[in-house]
């Protein structure tokens, strides 16, 4: 093949500016029924719950207040930074008709750390 030249182009890897996955905020909740739930909040639209030795990835759903996540027949509804409720969705339900079990962030996780440079009391 006359006039055909093969050349190779060197590829540079771009510098990675940030992590591929957004950082997760992980909290541990103790529920009124004695269960412990670990919830990791990934970005603004996903909560990954570890409940009864299984993990569930729940997606943000419409709510009037708080943040409500649903999936796999579960509803996880957080109110403020330290309170939540886990309810089972009945077949056909978009919002759980039962209030579910109340859960609260455990121990030191419920207390916010002091601001950098702040004096501890």
Image (tube, grey):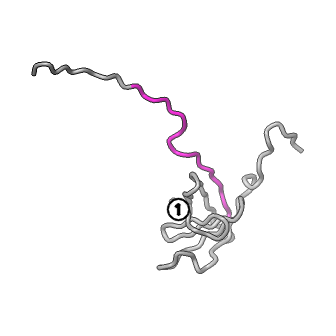
Q: Residue furthest right?
A: 121
Horizontal side of residue 11 vs 95, given as left or right: left
Tag 1 residue: 59
Compared with 72, 117 (above or below) is: above
Asked whether residue 45 is drawn in magenta, I would say no
Would you identify the image quadrant in which residue 67 lies?
A: bottom right
Q: Position of residue 18 (x, y in %)?
A: 54, 37
Range of the magenta residues?
A: 12-31
Q: Position of residue 82 (x, y in %)?
A: 72, 60
Q: Residue furthest left?
A: 1
Compared with 28, 118 (above or below) is: above
Compared with 116, 11 (above or below) is: above
Asked whether residue 23 is drawn in magenta, I would say yes
Identify the residue at horizontal 80%, vertical 44% (top origin): 114
Would you identify the image quadrant in which residue 75 lies?
A: bottom right
Main SS, magenta region, reads loop
Identify the residue at horizontal 65%, vertical 71% (top origin): 64
Q: Position of residue 92 (x, y in %)?
A: 47, 79
Horizontal side of residue 90 vs 6, given as left or right: right
Q: Position of residue 29 (x, y in %)?
A: 67, 61
In terms of secondary structure, where does tag 1 sit? Answer: strand
Q: Quadrant of the C terminus?
A: top right
Identify the residue at horizontal 52%, vertical 62% (top origin): 58
């Amino acid at each position: 093949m006359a006039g055909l030249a093969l050349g190779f182009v060197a590829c540079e890897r771009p510098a990675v500016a940030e992590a591929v996955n957004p950082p997760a905020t992980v909290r541990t909740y103790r529920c009124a029924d004695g269960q412990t739930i670990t919830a990791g909040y990934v970005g603004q639209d996903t909560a990954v719950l570890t409940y009864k030795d299984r993990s569930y990835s729940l997606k943000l759903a419409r709510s009037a207040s708080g943040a409500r996540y649903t999936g796999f027949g579960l509803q996880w509804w957080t109110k403020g930074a330290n309170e939540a409720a886990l309810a089972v969705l009945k077949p056909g339900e978009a919002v759980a008709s039962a209030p579910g079990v109340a859960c609260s962030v455990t121990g030191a996780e419920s207390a916010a750390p002091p601001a950098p440079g702040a004096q501890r009391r």
